[in-house]
């Protein structure tokens, strides 16, 4: 029997809150020394809370949507496209209900000047009311400052993850922080730490892919860059990791639907990235809108208080997602009344409710406080976290936009950073017979719905929530009748900057308009986008297929297969006999197995952002050598949901009684896959010892040589496999990676270190009185694999009927772990 080494303290079972013994609770992690500044803030906050009424405290815990304070013709505020504040409604929010936080833009992005005006009006009212507490304004700035015109938009997270370069995510976060703060926006609802393991899920593009370690590295890079200057700096924003926890694991694949996750899986795959984010210093966290194992997370005291606060040691602000306390009553049906829903959520651990369209939460919370149903100490703890964040952000000293921050918007170097990010994300999936790069002397046909469309390059959260169709431009006419004293012209206001190019335009800029034939138009649904123009004189076809923009529930689908119109267009292009270069512009992998065998070259650009078209043109014509790698397993069939880290039995298919083949994991392209215009050779893989003992480090190195004729970048990936374990081991797990630039003909040695923590897993232990989950490392044999993807070649089995572990990966390095 293997000997088990326990790495961390006992973790109480998720089932404990309903059935099992909860007597054994882990101690919270040790906190770092409190600075003098923190002590000063704490004293000020405590003094302020001592003077606050129940109404003021409830108000601080309330977040409403901007529409609640705007002039409106229909009573909703959603008919006001320009953020024009109604003073009477602002009084209602700030004076009557003492609201502590506001969020969002209504319908569309505003200019920087509009944001400055909005923030100034709100703070002028708040800081002259009651205890003079400024408002905390929150925004979804997911890949740039979503709701500000002319902001710099970077690739979405799924594309950033394809760079396998945390510096790319950091570059986007840095610019986002600067441009958000320049608008007076100090709280950003990002990064998304949900796992992307089901591409049907419409928020898949916002994830960093299927692997917890990759998600962790990218998420920590974002959080660090958002906050590293210090929250009081005009260069920083408060980050918000989300959505705690298990949000993306919905059984249906649709948004905000139930997840059923055994706790051993929850802790192994879904918790580590949040643990790392807490350690990195994330200031706030947003909660999963769905339910896990029948309990809505917004009502789950075990997860919010015992795990998040107790085990992870999170001390920051916990905010709901959109209307999620209401939904405990209205959708989940666990609370018979709205009042009970408020009580349940607050006692579970919620600090602030994104209400957002009424003041019912505030009213019920005031009633619950006055009736003694929620202890005042509990309320004060939440209010303290809110006020502490406001003080750290410098809102009490300067609640409006700092003068030194204003100039940080729209700097020319931001476009260069967005181009760097877009180039790094582009992933070359197929390149038979070196079809790419193309020569600039040739003539090309460019076709498909994504060929001449700007919004589809940006995806969701791009100047609007859904990412607008290029033909959808907002007029000011509808606002004239109800905004008193305001006169608008009749001009329409396009949302995307004029400098943003489509793929067609970028290709024309690259090789000349006379060499590009394209009939595609900006309207995604136009029939012209689904047929070929004249091919006369053309040398190749660049086929731009994929998805239009979408966000959240409107992006739900039931089939990953690319739609029939696009498949027919691809098949028609293949039949011409011209070389077809497929450029995928997509937020998630769409199944293309119906025609991909007839396409010699495939490039995945994901949703690459403001500079995406330029990056695509650079890659297609060889001005940039692609080095991206897939952050997910690209499915060949719409039912393929086996991940690279599958258990062996998931991939082992029994074809006849006693006959097995390895056909369970057969993606179109595996996790970590990506090609280059050069080639790389791996050699001289070494480990420092064949026995890793206790807390020592195993050093692993490999030599990588660029054997081609052009400079390139290779993502060197390290995986391990536990050969035998008391919990069924994965076939492999990603443990480390590094993106390395190597010149043509050059060799570089890449080194990593592995600790026993890297070899650990979550183990369930149950007795008659306790039910515990513990992270352990067990003594035994392990293998290390290093390469340019997760797809390592298996050695032949000694006998036909023998399967893993008797079969192993070629070139794997063997070592043994022991405690001492």
Image (tube, grey):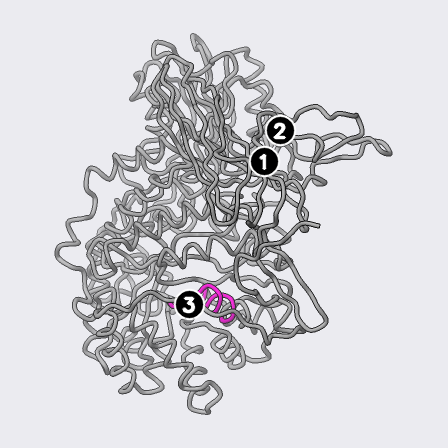
Pointer 2 or 3: first along the chain: 3
Real-space Cα distance between discs 3 and 1? 41 Å
CB of mark 2 within 8 Å of CB of mark 3? Answer: no
Residue 186: where, in percent of width, then height?
27, 60
Residue 424 falls in which quadrant of the image?
top left
Do labels 1 and 2 touch, CB within 8 Å?
yes
Residue 136 locus on image (x, y percent): 29, 67
Neighbourhood count class around disc 1 (C-alpha, 10 Å): few under 14, some 14–19, many 20 upward? some
* Label 3 SS: strand
Give residue 310's position: percent from left, percent from top.
48, 69
Whether residue 528 is visible: no
Q: Give the quadrant of residue 487.
A: bottom left
Q: Identify the residue shown where x is 40% and y is 39%.
A: 160
Res 740 quadrant in image? top left
Task: Using the image, tell me which numbered label, if any, was put on residue 349.
Answer: none
Q: Which residue is mark 3?
A: 318
Mark 2 lies on residue: 809
Direction from residue 174 to residue 634 in the image, left or right: right
In the displayed image of the protein, which residue is found farthest to the bottom? 371
Residue located at (49% from left, 38% from top): 631
Q: Is residue 110 visible?
A: yes
> Magenta residues, as a range?
305-320
What label sits on residue 783 in the rendered view? 1
* Disc 1/disc 2 C-alpha distance (Å): 9 Å
User: Which type of secondary structure does the marked residue at label 1 adopt?
Assistant: strand
Q: Is residue 3 above or below residue 543?
A: below
Tally of numbered discs: 3
Cα distance in 3D space between marks 2 and 3: 45 Å
Which residue extends farthest front?
820
């Amino acid at each position: 029997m293997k000997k088990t080494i326990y790495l961390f303290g006992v973790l109480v079972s998720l089932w404990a809150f309903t059935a099992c013994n909860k007597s054994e609770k882990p101690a919270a992690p040790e906190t770092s020394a409190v600075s003098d500044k923190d002590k000063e803030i704490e004293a000020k906050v405590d003094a302020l809370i001592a003077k606050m009424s129940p109404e003021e405290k409830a108000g601080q815990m309330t977040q409403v949507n901007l529409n609640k304070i705007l002039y409106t013709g229909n009573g909703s505020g959603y008919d006001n496209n320009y953020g024009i504040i109604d003073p009477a409604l602002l009084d209602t929010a700030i004076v009557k209900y003492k609201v502590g936080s506001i969020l969002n833009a209504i319908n569309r992005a505003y200019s920087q000047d509009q944001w400055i005006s909005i923030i100034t009006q709100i703070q002028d009212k708040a800081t002259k009311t009651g205890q003079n507490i400024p408002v905390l304004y929150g925004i979804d700035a997911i890949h740039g400052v979503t709701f500000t015109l002319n902001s710099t938009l970077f690739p979405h997270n799924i594309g950033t993850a394809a760079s396998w370069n945390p510096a790319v995510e950091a570059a986007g976060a840095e610019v986002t922080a600067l441009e958000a703060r320049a608008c007076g926006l100090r709280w950003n609802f990002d990064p998304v730490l949900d796992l992307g393991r089901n591409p049907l899920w419409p928020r898949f593009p916002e994830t960093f892919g299927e692997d917890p370690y990759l998600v962790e590295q990218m998420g920590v890079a974002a959080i660090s860059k958002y906050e590293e200057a210090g929250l009081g700096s005009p260069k920083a924003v408060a980050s918000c990791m989300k959505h705690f926890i298990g949000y993306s694991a919905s059984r249906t694949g649709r948004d905000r639907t139930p997840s059923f996750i055994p706790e051993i899986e929850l802790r192994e795959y879904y918790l580590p990235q949040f643990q790392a984010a807490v350690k990195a210093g994330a200031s706030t966290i947003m909660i999963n809108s769905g339910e896990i194992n029948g309990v809505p997370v917004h009502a789950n005291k075990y997860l919010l208080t015992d795990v998040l606060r107790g085990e992870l040691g999170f001390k920051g602000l916990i905010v709901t997602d959109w209307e999620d306390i209401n939904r405990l009553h209205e959708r989940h049906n666990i609370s018979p009344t709205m009042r009970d829903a408020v009580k349940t959520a607050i006692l579970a651990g919620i600090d602030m409710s994104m209400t957002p369209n009424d003041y019912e939460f505030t009213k019920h919370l005031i009633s619950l406080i006055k009736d003694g149903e929620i202890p005042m100490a509990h309320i004060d703890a939440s209010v303290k976290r809110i006020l502490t964040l406001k003080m750290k952000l410098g809102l009490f000293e300067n609640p409006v936009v700092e003068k030194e921050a204003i100039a940080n918007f729209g700097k020319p170097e931001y476009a260069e950073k967005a181009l760097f990010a877009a180039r790094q994300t582009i992933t070359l999936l197929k390149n038979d017979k070196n079809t790419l790069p193309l020569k600039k002397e040739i003539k090309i046909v460019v076709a498909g719905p994504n060929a001449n469309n700007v919004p589809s390059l940006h995806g969701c959260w791009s100047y609007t929530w859904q990412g607008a169709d290029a033909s959808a431009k907002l007029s000011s006419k509808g606002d004239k009748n109800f905004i008193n004293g305001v006169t608008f012209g009749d001009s329409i206001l396009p949302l995307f900057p004029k400098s943003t190019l489509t793929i067609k335009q970028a290709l024309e800029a690259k090789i000349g308009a006379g060499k590009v034939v394209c009939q595609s138009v900006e309207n995604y649904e136009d029939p012209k986008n689904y047929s070929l123009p004249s091919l006369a004189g053309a040398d190749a076809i660049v086929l731009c297929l994929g998805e239009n923009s979408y966000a959240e529930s409107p992006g739900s689908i039931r089939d990953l297969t690319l739609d029939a119109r696009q498949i027919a267009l691809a098949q028609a292009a293949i039949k011409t006999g011209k070389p077809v270069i497929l450029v995928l512009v997509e937020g998630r992998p769409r199944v293309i197995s119906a025609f991909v065998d007839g396409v010699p070259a495939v490039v995945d650009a994901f949703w690459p952002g403001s500079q995406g078209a330029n990056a695509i043109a650079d890659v297609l014509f060889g001005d940039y050598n692609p080095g991206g790698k897939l952050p997910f397993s690209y499915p060949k069939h719409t039912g393929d949901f086996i991940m690279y880290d599958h258990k062996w039995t998931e991939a082992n298919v029994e074809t006849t009684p006693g006959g097995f083949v390895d056909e369970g994991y057969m993606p179109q392209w595996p996790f970590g896959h990506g090609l280059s215009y050069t080639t790389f050779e791996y050699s001289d893989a070494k480990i420092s010892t064949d026995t890793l003992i206790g807390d020592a480090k195993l050093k692993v190195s490999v030599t990588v040589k660029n054997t081609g004729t052009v400079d390139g970048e290779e993502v060197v990936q390290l995986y391990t496999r536990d050969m035998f374990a008391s919990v069924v081991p994965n076939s492999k797990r990603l443990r480390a990676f590094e993106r390395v630039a190597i010149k043509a003909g050059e060799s570089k040695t890449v080194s990593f270190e592995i600790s026993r923590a890297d070899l650990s897993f979550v183990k369930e232990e149950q007795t008659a009185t306790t039910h515990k989950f513990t992270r352990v490392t067990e003594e035994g044999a392990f293998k290390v694999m290093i390469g340019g993807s997760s797809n390592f070649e298996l050695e032949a089995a000694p006998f036909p009927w023998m399967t893993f572990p008797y079969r192993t990966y070629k070139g794997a390095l063997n070592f043994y772990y022991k405690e001492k």
